[in-house]
Image (spheres, rainbow, N blue to C red):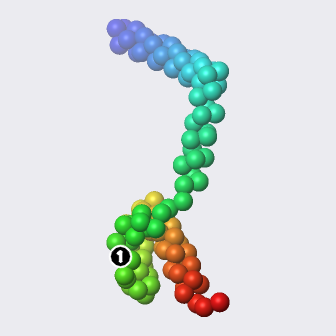
């Protein structure tokens, strides 16, 4: 008998708690939209997404120096990319790929600047 009462109390209490959590969440969303927090959060996310990787950051990620030839950079890229593919780290794999893209642009612009016009 006591177990049945206890079970009913637990079920009723969890239902009340669930409704309170949902109501608090809705209120938090309403407060955030009134204060403009959601707009600010979206704007900050857009700013972070639009950040371009610098050459220095790309070199740090790949572990290369300015003096290294392009072939060495590609070897480092392949090694890091494959290692992260095997370990399942998509985030690191994408950082390695973006670093290679950044350095490709740098080396391409150096090659274009070195050719006489």
15 sits to left or right of 73:
right
Disc 1 crowd rating (10 Å Cα; few below 14, some 14-19, many 20+) is few
116 sits to left or right of 7:
right
> Is residue 39 depicted above or below 77 in this figure?
above
The one of 57 and 112 positioned closer to us in this rendering = 112
Residue with the most extreme bottom position: 116
> Is residue 7 depicted above or below 114 in this figure?
above
Query: Residue 27: where, in percent of width, then height?
Result: 59, 18
Query: Residue 23: where, in percent of width, then height?
Result: 57, 17
Picture quarter with the C terminus: bottom right
Q: On the image, numbered disc 1 is attached to which residue? A: 65
Name the residue rendered at 45%, 59% in the picture: 91
Picture quarter with the N terminus: top left
Q: Quadrant of residue 52?
A: bottom right
State whether residue 58 appears in this view.
yes
Number of numbered discs on residues = 1
Name the residue rendered at 60%, 46% in the picture: 46
């Amino acid at each position: 008998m006591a177990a049945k009462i206890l079970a009913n109390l637990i079920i009723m209490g969890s239902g009340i708690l669930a409704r309170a959590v949902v109501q608090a969440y809705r209120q938090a969303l309403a407060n955030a939209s009134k204060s403009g927090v959601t707009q600010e959060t979206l704007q900050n996310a857009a700013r972070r997404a639009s950040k371009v990787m610098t050459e220095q950051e790309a070199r740090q990620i790949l572990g290369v120096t300015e003096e290294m030839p392009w072939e060495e950079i590609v070897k480092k890229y392949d090694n890091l990319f494959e290692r992260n593919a095997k370990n399942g780290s998509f985030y690191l794999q994408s950082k390695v790929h973006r670093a290679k893209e950044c350095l490709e642009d740098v080396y391409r612009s150096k090659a274009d600047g070195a050719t006489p016009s």
